[in-house]
Every structure is written in C-alpha cells, then in structure tokens.
Amino acid sequence: MTTLTFDLPDNLIKEAKSAGLLTPKVIEAMLRESLRRRAVDGLFSAADKLAAANAPAMTMEEIQKEVNAVRAQRK
C-alpha cells in the first residue's frame, strides 16, 4: 500500500467528504474507473486513426502471416 498526500481546495474536500467520496474504497473505485475509461478512449482513438488511414483490408492469409510472425518473435 502507498499513502498519498496532496493539497486540494477546502470547499472541494468538504463537498467530497459530505458525499462520502473520501474513503479509500471509493477513491480506489474512482481511479480504476478513470483508468478503464482512458484505456477505452485510447482504443477508440486508435480505431479512428486506423479508419482514417483508408488502408486496404487484409485478407485472412495476410492476417495469419502477421499472427505467425508475432508468435515467432515471442519464442
């Protein structure tokens, strides 16, 4: 476990505390959700870039060749 200390505006702390948001369990859940959301946003961003590239679709044979190459690299 790691302990974090940081400065936030008093009014924000007061509101968050009254809403029950300052417990370790709730903060952990918020951080995990934020990380998940960023990962999903990154995935969609990459998909948008790929779609914008207008690259021709790969055949199943080309896909299999790429998969085989990656597998060979990992060995």
Image (spheres, rainbow, N blue to C red):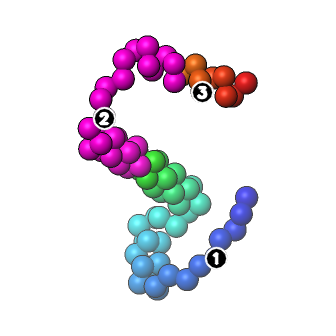
Dot 3 or dot 1, earlier in sequence: 1
Distance CA(mark 3)–CA(mark 1): 43 Å
Task: Identify the disc placed on residue 55.
Answer: 2
Q: Which residue is mark 3?
A: 70
Q: Residue furthest bottom?
A: 10
User: Where on the picture, by quarter, is residue 46?
Assistant: top left
Question: Which residues make up the magenta segment?
Answer: 41-66
Residue type at the position of mark 2: Ala
Per the image, label 1 sits on a secondary structure element best described as loop
**Nearer-N-terminus badge (2/3):** 2
Residue pointed to by mark 1: 5
Residue 12: percent from left, percent from top: 42, 79
At 40% from the left and 75% from the top, the residue drawn is 15
Left or right: where 7 falls relative to 60: right
Look at the numbered discs 3 and 1 and tell me whether their residues touch, using CB distance below 8 Å: no
Q: Residue furthest top?
A: 61
Between tags 2 and 3, which lies in front? 2
* Cα distance in 3D space between marks 1 and 2: 48 Å
Residue 30, position as x, y percentages in the image: 48, 57
Q: Amino acid at mark 3?
A: Val
Name the residue nearer the viewer: 3 or 58. Answer: 58
Question: Which residue sits at x=31%, y=26%?
Answer: 57
Q: Residues within 10 Å of mark 2 (few under 14, many from 20)?
A: few
